[in-house]
Each structure stands twice: as structure tokens, then as C-alpha cells.
Image (cartoon, rainbow, N blue to C red):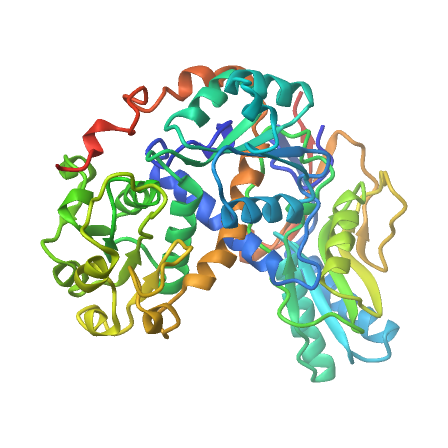
Amino acid sequence: MPTQKSVSHERVREKAEIVDGEGLRRAITRIAHEIIERNDGAKDLVLVGIRTRGVPIAERLAQKIREFEGIELPVGALDITLYRDDLQKIAHQPVVSGTDVPTSIDDKIVVLVDDVLYTGRTVRAALDELIDLGRPKAIQLAVIVDRGHREIPIRADFVGKNVPTSKREVIMVHVSEVDELDGVSIGEILP
Amino acid sequence: MIGTRKDLLGLEDLAPEEIVSILDTARTFREVLDRPIPKVPSLRGLTAANLFFEASTRTRLSFELAEKRLSADTVNFQTSGSSVSKGESLKDTARNIEAMGIHLVVIRHQSSGAPHYLARNLDAGVINAGDGTHEHPTQGLLDIFTIRERRGKVAGLRVAIIGDIAHSRVARSNIWGLTKLGASVTIAGPSTMMPMEVERFGIKVAKSVEEAIEGADVVNILRIQLERQRSTLYSSLREYARVYGITSARLKGAKPDVTVMHPGPMNRGVEIAQDVADGEHSVILEQVTNGVAVRMAVLYLLAGHKAPDESAAEHPMPKETKKAHGEPSLHPRR
């Protein structure tokens, strides 16, 4: 089973909503506060979202940080497709939609943003790509859901919600920019 | 779709959406080329062989660079200094290459259809880097990519292609690709260099260069292939330059923001005047950079192919490749 952001053709049955739209907005607000607190403000920060859903989440974090600190942070988008470690294993080459980091990340603190942290392989690929783009002073990781089952030693600095899961389950983070509604739900892969 | 293809042999076989997907993917790689470290690990562990049975500098360099930017290992093979000069057949060369565990083969060959032959006999993916007078699909793709990036679209554009159309694989690939994407193509050049049956391609033949350029969005100037011309298809280079050479005076008939292209290497002062080659409308060096991105896209997309058994039926030989001079339907009028 592909463990990265692959186009999975498995059928999934949605079981329950575990965070509603309001809860998701609160989690993003809290993470924005934590980012500011950890970095003593928002100076030299760059937010980089991992495509697809990491990008709107990064944009929302930037909006919150602008409200709190009055600083406009650059927001970039990372497409990790070309850095996947399973390209030789999956059926067809996935569509690449492109990386767009509009600013130099040299000597900046990059906050990498994604919806779900699972095996850690996506983040591994993203770290490799970031390092090819420049030499940041530090990289931090913000995710909406940490669902466990890490396959490589990676941890998040900012977590919206820890959700213990089984590997048969799926976590779906919905953001209105992509999915027309906000919230997190848990589903089950149908056999 | 391109994701299920093993080979890229020509633009004639591609559906418009396949061409668009290659161009979209190439845009991603164009961004990669601008990075401080212009390299991605996507083809790590794969090996590409560049087989050049015909002299080439920029196409071979461009492919090799594309392969390296994708982290593939590369081996190069040129006719001189290889076993081909010792009489080895194309099939045996190919088998040897396969026995070495090569995944992607880039081939340039003087005979139309040689890449098709390899494609049918190899499990490896085959990319045509120019076969005889048949096609040069990656050049066609990079020209169309450059047009699309410059002008924002392809459909509805007026593209003039000037020069030896009948013997040009670059022209053929351009014509297939451009017409599939909805551009209108007009060709001009000496009548000995015009193809027959132009209706088949849905293109227009202009009576003069001036007529072809009139109102054009893009002027693609082909190279006069001094080395490929055995018989005299025009009286002299000076005569060619006078009647068909693209000068800034001739270019005035085109759109004011016309895009001027040339696949290189240029014969300055023959098919293209010095000031046009280096002028504000010229995108000739951009074509070179884009070429690497487009080839990366093709290599990346073909590397995803995982079912080598379905390829044989998919790629028939181009029609009439047994004839020495490519497709008879495109033979020059004599």
C-alpha cells in the first residue's frame, strides 16, 4: 500500500466527523499563536504548505499571524511528487502541479504545513526539497492531525489534534478552499 | 494517455491532451531549472542510454542534462568509436544495451523508423531524438512549449514555418503538434522543399515568405541543412538568403510582437539575418533552456510506464519507412 500522498483508489467509508469547522478554525488559531510564541514573533518566518491541503492551511495561518502581529508572511507551495521514494513502485507517474516558493528561504525559519502527519515520508520528501531550494535557519513542522504510525523519525512542532488511528483507517482533513467545507473526519478503508 | 505509454516516437501518435499534459509537466521542470540546486531525485536508480547514430551536439547535451537533472544515470553511445562502425546491427546493439539493464533509450538515427524498430524490440522506453526525415518530437514539443509560454496559448495562433519543410523532421513534429492544439500553420520556402499532400496536415502553403509571415504570431525559421542536401534544391546560399532569408524588413509584416524561433544551429546571414537572430523578438536561447525542461517532462512521464507487454501493437512503423527518404506523401515536389 502506498504510504505517501498517493492517489489512492481504495474505497473509503466515512465513519465520523471528529473536528467540526469551528474546531478546525480554533486549531489553526492556536497553532498560529504557538508559532509566534515559539519564534518570539513572526520575524523571518516563511510558511510553506505541502500540496494540496497544506497550502490553504498555510494561507490561513498567515492570515491569523497578520491579525495578531501585523506582519505579512510569505506563503509558498511545495509539490513533493518529484521527491517521493515510491516513484518506481506506483503504477503511473503522478501529475506534478509544481512548487512555488516565492521568496528565498536562505536564513529564514520555514514552517512546513501539512494536513495530516502519518508515516513521515511526505515530510521527509518535503525536507529534501526545501534543502534543494536553499539553506533555511530552521525548519519547523505544523500539522492539523497527527495520526501516529511513523515509519521514519520525524515529529511535528505544532499539532492541531492527536488522533490515534489504526492503519485501516483514513483521516480526511477538509478545507473549504478545496473541499467546500471545513472539518476533520475519520473513515475506514473498505476491503 | 502518456502515463501508459512506453515510448515517445512522434507527435503524430499523440492525442492533444497528451501533448498538453507533457507541456504542463514541463512547466514544473522549468521551475526546477531555476532553483539553486536544479536537480530532483525522481529517476534515481534508472539508467538512460543516449544512442546517437547521427551527429548532434545540442540535442544530445540537452537530453543528457535532462537525465542528470532527474538523477538518472546516463551512458552515451555514438556511432564513431562504437561497435556500429564494426558492423553490428541495430537489433544487436539494442539487445546489448538491454542486457546492461537500461531503462530508457534516447535514439537519433539517420533512418526514419529506427526508433519504432527499437521500441518494438525493447522493454525499455524509447524516445525518438530525430529519425531521418520523419519526426523530432521533443524539438516539436519544446517549440510548442516556448510558444505557449510566450503567447499564453496555442489555439488560434498563426504560425509560419519557413524553409525546407519536406526534409525537416522538426517541421513535421511542429506541424503535427501545432495543428493538434488548434494553431493555424502556414509554410513557405523553395518549391523543391515543399511537401506534397499538405491537405493531410491541414496547413497552408504560401507563395512567398512575405505572404506566410503576414500577420503571423510566430515565425519558426528552419535551418538550411547544408549537410543533408545531396542534390541542389536551390541555386545558391546567397540566392536562398535573398528570397527566403528572414530579415527585420521582412518581419515587419508579422504581428508587432511576433515571436521568432529557430531550432539551431543557425546559419546566420542565410536563413536568418544577424539582427533577427539577436533581436528583441528572438526566443532562440529560451528554446534551448525550455528544451531541457521538456525533455525532463518526457523522461519523467515515460519512466512511469510499468507494463512492457502492451507496447508492440501500439506503435506501428511509420508508413513506408522502407523507402530511403521517409514518407513519400511528404516528398518534395520535383
Left-right relation of A155 to B110: right
Q: Nearer the viewer, residue B33 or B279?
A: B279
The image shows residue A15, relative to residue A184, as above or below, that is above
Where on the picture, by quarter, is residue B316? top left
How many numbered badges does the structure rendering display?
Answer: 0
Where is residue B290 drawn, in percent x and y? 49, 56
Where residue B23 appears, x then y in whole percent? 45, 49
| Quarter of the image that includes the N terminus of chain B | top left
| Residue A24 appears left or right of B333 | right
State the residue at coordinates (49%, 41%).
B55
Up-down relation of residue A147 to residue B111 (above or below):
below
Q: Position of residue A98 (x, y in %)?
A: 57, 54
Q: Quadrant of the C terminus of chain B?
A: top left
Q: Is residue A144 visible?
A: no
**Horizontal arrangement in the rendering, residue B305 relative to residue A103 (left or right):** left
Q: Residue at x 38, y 46 (%)?
A: B140
Please, which residue is most extreme toward the bottom here?
A70
Quadrant position of residue A147 = top right
Residue at x-position 48% and y-position 57%: B288
**Is the residue B267 above or below the residue A82 in the image?**
below
Look at the picture and state if B182 lies above or below A85: below
